[in-house]
Amino acid sequence: MTASWSYDAIAEVYATDMGLSMAFDDVGWYRAFCTEQGGAALELGCGTGRILLELLAAGIDIVGADRSLPMLQRLRRDAAARGLDARVLQMDLRAPALASRFATILLPYSLITYLTDPAIAAEVLAGLRGLLAGEGCVVLDAFVPQPVQSFADFRLDYRRPHEDGFLERRKRITAHADGTNRIERWYRVLDANDALREEFHTDETIRPYAPAQLQALAQQAGYVVQREVRDYSDAPPSAAMRFVTLILRP
């Protein structure tokens, strides 16, 4: 059993929160990639199943792992509602507890940024090589870092429809000298009349990795970077790109 962590608090609002914050069709890209790759897939950091359930519905043989039990409980409920048999386990990606081998291992939606020590990030990537089958690959993606300034007040990120009311999120950022960023988020769940139903906070520290840093981590972990994908498309490199995905093979 892993310890609780910040994301446990947002399991019931994740689909409205992080699930609606991706501006690109990453799910469609992962679905097409795993279909072409064939074989079994593993999604690390599967959360409430934003990606996993769509891949499962497309007939992909996929297993999910996440350290948050509340997230996995919500995933199982949503899978059952869709008639899907989701195979998931609670696991910290720093200590994988799997005997199976996979054709594709996904680290989507900037999961790597939660490994704030680059040495540990490289160790985790290296350890995943032991879970790959044959010509298997690791798919590693992360947002492209942008300039960050600290601010002490909680600033409104969004107000979105949620169930029969609204979800509001505010955040406060502290940029550290070592390149990590502390991100505190304050959520308020409101009814249709804006009366407060509940509120909760999350607090995590991440390390943004530039594309060159991701490449260096991969090489340190013993991989060859087979391909680099930008914004889940065939887009060329540009100053405007938001996400980079690396296809890694041992």
Image (cartoon, grey):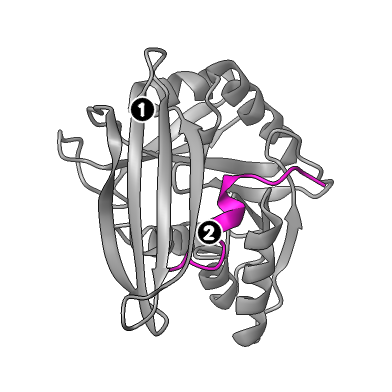
Residue extending furthest toward the top: 177
Q: Is residue 156 found left or right of 102 in the rendered image?
A: left
* Front residue of 19 and 100: 19
Q: Position of residue 250 (x, y in %)?
A: 61, 29
Amino acid type, label 1: Thr
Q: Is residue 130 found left or right of 57 in the rendered image?
A: right
2 in magenta: yes
Q: Residue at x 55, y 68 (%)?
A: 12
Residue extending furthest toward the front: 195
Label 1 to label 2: alpha-carbon separation: 21 Å
Q: Which residues are magenta?
A: 1-16
Amino acid type, label 2: Ile
Give me the disc on residue 28.
none
Q: Residue at x 59, y 49 (%)?
A: 45
The image quadrant that residue 180 belongs to is top left
Say whether disc 1 or disc 2 marks the residue closer to the N-terminus.
2
Give the vertical position of 29 relative to 181 (above or below): below
Give the vertical position of 194 relative to 177 (above or below): below
Q: Position of residue 31 (x, y in %)?
A: 47, 64
Q: Position of residue 54 (x, y in %)?
A: 51, 71
Helix, strand or loop under label 2: helix
The image quadrant that residue 120 belongs to is top right
Q: Residue at x 57, y 46 (%)?
A: 6
Helix, strand or loop under label 1: strand
Residue 46 visible in rendering: no
Q: Which residue is mark 2?
A: 10
161 in magenta: no
The image quadrant that residue 123 belongs to is top right
Q: Which residue is mark 1?
A: 174
